Image (cartoon, rainbow, N blue to C red):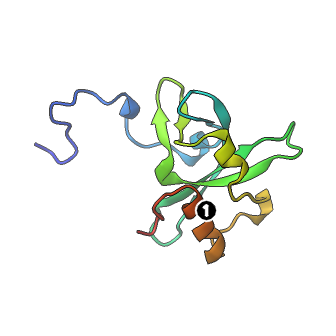
Amino acid sequence: MPANAQADQGPNPALEGHPLVSAQKVSGAAVYDQKGEKLGQIEDVMLHKISGRVAYAVMAYGGFLGVGERYHPLPWSILTWDPERQGYVVPLERTQLEGAPALAQDELSDSDEAWRDRVHSHFQAAPYWM
């Protein structure tokens, strides 16, 4: 059986068509909590330039018409694609986002190790480089 075959699990609706998505299509995708409440939308993705792995989905949260909006880098590992919602689900509640590390859009970078560690610690997610 090929390594990517699913034994006795049936079709996986999250992979309908093919398992790849362009970064352009990820941008703008809604992000929901596990109850189905919309938390925000993905503005951008951050890639590790050596490995090519997706490190973070940058989610816009709060604000009105772009004013007061905060940007939360969410570790990619905590996002799950939900084909019914056509968006991503995260194991977070709104209160967790309110206290999460946030930056202005022009500050998004992965060069600050302390910031990177705070993000992964806050969301209790394994770093992408592990």
Tell me if residue 88 comes above or below residue 68 in the rendering. above
Q: Quadrant of residue 110?
A: bottom right
Please identify the quadrant where the C terminus is shown: bottom left
Q: What is the total number of numbered labels drawn onto the structure image? A: 1
Name the residue nearer the viewer: 50 or 88: 88
Name the residue nearer the viewer: 67 or 48: 67
Residue 66 located left or right of residue 9: right
Q: Quadrant of residue 123?
A: bottom right
Name which residue type carries label 1: Val
- How crowded pointer 1 is (Cα within 10 Å; few <14, some 14-19, many 20+) is rated as many
Residue 129 located left or right of residue 38: left
Picture residue at 62% right of the left edge, 66% below the top: 118
x then y, percent, for residue 67: 89, 44
Picture residue at 46% right of the left edge, 61% below the top: 53
Q: Which residue is mark 1?
A: 119
x then y, percent, for residue 61: 74, 43
Picture residue at 67% right of the left edge, 40% below the top: 94
x then y, percent, for residue 82: 48, 31
Please identify the quadrant where the N terminus is shown: top left
Callout 1: SS: helix
Q: Inspect this view and state whether residue 17 appears.
A: no
Find the residue positioned furthest to the left: 1
Residue 47 located left or right of residue 1: right
Q: Inspect this view and state whether residue 75 appears.
A: yes
